[in-house]
Image: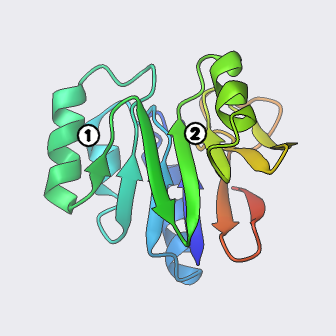
Amino acid sequence: MKIGIVSDTHDDEGNVKKIVRIFKKENIENVIHLGDYVAPPIVRIFKDFKLTGIFGNNDGYKYGLIQAFTEIGGTILGDFGKIILGGLSLALYHGEFREISEALAKSGDYDVVFCGHFHKSEQTVFGKTLLLSPGSAHSYFKKDSSPTFGIFNTEEKKFEIISI
């Protein structure tokens, strides 16, 4: 199973629409968003997918985000989430505190810990656990590199970082 992984969209509707087109081309059904949508309209762009998300530190209008998730049949888990997809145990954390991201990975309770926040992609291994970040999907703060997102293959446990 391939899962689309995105974080820190920060209302960048143009990039989100590009990502959605790529997810459709890749036959992605499940998408995980790691927070910092900023406003509800970004959530609605993912209406053709089974969207699972968590809040980020820039998601102030949580009620509106919850409503948008409800409208598209998605699931918003709060500030932290635990799910099982493709037979793997996944932790979802926005990533404001690196110590928490690493502690989740080092706990051994998860196959994969997904996080965002720092606007850079990452693939690190702690024991049997992968700590993965898709980077940032928005263009606003990216002067030295292009926006990124990821596709995670649960069967191969491989994470592809894609630049837009």
Q: Residue at x 53, y 31 (%)?
A: 94
Q: Residue at x 23, y 50 (%)?
A: 69
Q: Nearer the viewer, mark 2 or mark 1?
A: 1
159 lies left or right of 139: right
Q: Is residue 85 visible?
A: yes
Q: Quadrant of residue 121?
A: top right
Q: Looking at the figure, which quarter contains the C terminus?
A: bottom right
The vertical placement of 59 against 25, above or below, is above
Q: Residue at x 73, y 28 (%)?
A: 102
- Residues tagged 2 and 1 counted as in contact (Cβ below 8 A): no
In what element is the residue under mark 1?
Answer: helix
Which x, y percent locates residue 63?
16, 30
Q: Is residue 6 visible?
A: no
In what element is the residue under mark 2?
Answer: loop
In this figure, what is the number of numbered marks? 2
Q: How is the image coloured?
A: rainbow
The vertical placement of 14 against 77, above or below, is below
Amino acid type at mark 1: Pro
Which x, y percent locates residue 142?
71, 31
**Which residue is tagged 1?**
40
Other residues around mark 2 within 10 Å, as few (<14) / some (14–19) / many (≥20):
many
**Which residue is tagged 2?**
138
Amino acid type at mark 2: His
Sequence order check, earlier mark of 2 and 1:
1
- The residue lying toward the viewer, choosing from 57 and 83, is 83
